[in-house]
Amino acid sequence: MLKQSIRTVYNFNAGPSALPLPVLEKAQQELVNFRGTGMSIMELSHRSKAYDEVHNDAIARLRKLFSIPENYEVLFLQGGASLQFSMIPMNFLKPTQKAGYLMTGVWAEKAFDEAKLFGEPYEIASTKERNHNTIPNIKDLQYNEDDAYVHLTSNNTIYGTQWKEFPNTGNVPLVADMSSDIMSKPIDVSKFGLIYAGAQKNLGPSGVTVVIIRKDLLEEANSEIPTMLKYNTHAKSNSLYHTPPTFGIYMLGEVLRWIEELGGLEVVAKQNETKAKYIYDVIDGSNGFYIGHAEPASRSYMNITFRLADEELEKKFLAEAQEAGFVGLNGHRSVGGCRASAYNSVPVEACIALSEFMTQFQENNR
């Protein structure tokens, strides 16, 4: 069970999101005097041996847990996933090429709009007409064989949809924004040319962006762009070209250690599916009292989105949930409704408690 003397709420925030309690407790213990240095991790030079060990350990753990092949670089950048919306076309979208985008939600749309500033992106498929309640059928996708890349968003935090399998784009690099489901399950990294993710959902606190990039793409990248916006700049310097977000990288490494201690990504994936099922089962068994947004085949295990029959009942649900200690259940400001974000660090007990609250709320408001 949750340590309620320490954890007084159930955190379902969409991001920044819950962090593992053991990681927070370890950070608390090491905060003032980090491993005998007499300084906080936040005070260490990023060129010091003590920090160097933290930095390289985080990279090594990420490589091991995600089974990242040797022909990929692992980068720790800043600027969030939103900066990647620009960096990707700046580095890889040549004037003679196009880039295909799979439009499954707000973040895919933002990435598409940024690409327009640097070249000619086009929509391979869009779920906008269905209010982004589904994922495109990969058998129906058509793109140009000479595209610079194909871009998708693996999990859609706002609408609660998730790619269960990924298209095989052959010689065209597949680029994925995995900000909200990275490290939630095993994947075949070799299917992708580039993976990027803000850390604040499954990897750690906000401030770190992970980029996993195939080395041959670095060789082809545009060199006529600002130094800080070149992937090669960071690859050649082991992400130490300038001062990295040292505390965030330390926390990321500890979160990865926690995942290892749980048993790895296979265990995490099963746990995430179980957590989501508790909540989806209540929605499906409510006879329309709760209305799920995503089609069942496209449902996210990370972000469970739903509505109630009318806005007044919805407001009552959210108010009573807040009073009962459930934090972060409001849907995104652009769509409203309700959303439970059950990332890796959200314990099973929290999802059981929410499912029980939802059942009781329905019984009280028939």
Image: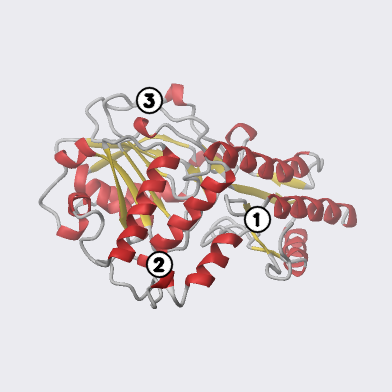
Q: Earlier in the sequence, mark 3 or mark 2?
A: 3
Which of discs 1 and 2 lies nearer the camera? The answer is 2
Q: Which residue is mark 3?
A: 168
Camera sees residue 309:
no
Q: Is 297 drawn above or below residue 21 in the view shown?
A: above
Q: How many marks?
A: 3
Residue at position x 44%, y 50% from top? 179
Side of 102 where 127 appears, left or right: right
Q: Secondary structure at mark 2?
A: helix
Residue 140 is at least partly visible in this image: yes
Q: Where on the picture, by quarter, is residue 177?
A: top left
Q: Position of residue 207 (x, y in %)?
A: 39, 64
**Percent coordinates x, y for residue 102 in the rendering:** 40, 37
Q: Residues within 10 Å of mark 1 (few under 14, many from 20)?
A: many
Give the crowd class for mark 2: few <14, some 14-19, many >=20 residues within 10 Å: many
In the rendered image, which residue does mark 2 sit on?
Answer: 247
Local SS, label 1: loop
**Amino acid bearing label 3:** Asn
Q: Hey, what amino acid is under mark 1?
A: Gly
**Label 3 vs label 1, nearer the camera:** 3
Query: In the image shown, does 213 or 53 lie closer to the viewer?
Result: 53
Which residue is farthest front? Answer: 36
As shown in the figure, which amino acid type bears the numbered disc 2?
Phe
Please indicate whether residue 64 sits to the left or right of residue 266 in the image.
left
Q: Say above or below: 174 vs 3.
A: above
**Label 3 vs label 1: CA separation?**
34 Å
Residue 21 position in % (x across, y down): 60, 62
Q: How far, Cα to Cα, is label 1 from label 2?
A: 34 Å
Instruction: Give the mark, 3 or 1, whose residue is nearer the N terminus.
Output: 3
Q: Residue at x 41, y 47 (%)?
A: 61
Which corner quadrant of the image does residue 225 belong to? bottom left
Say which residue label 1 marks: 337
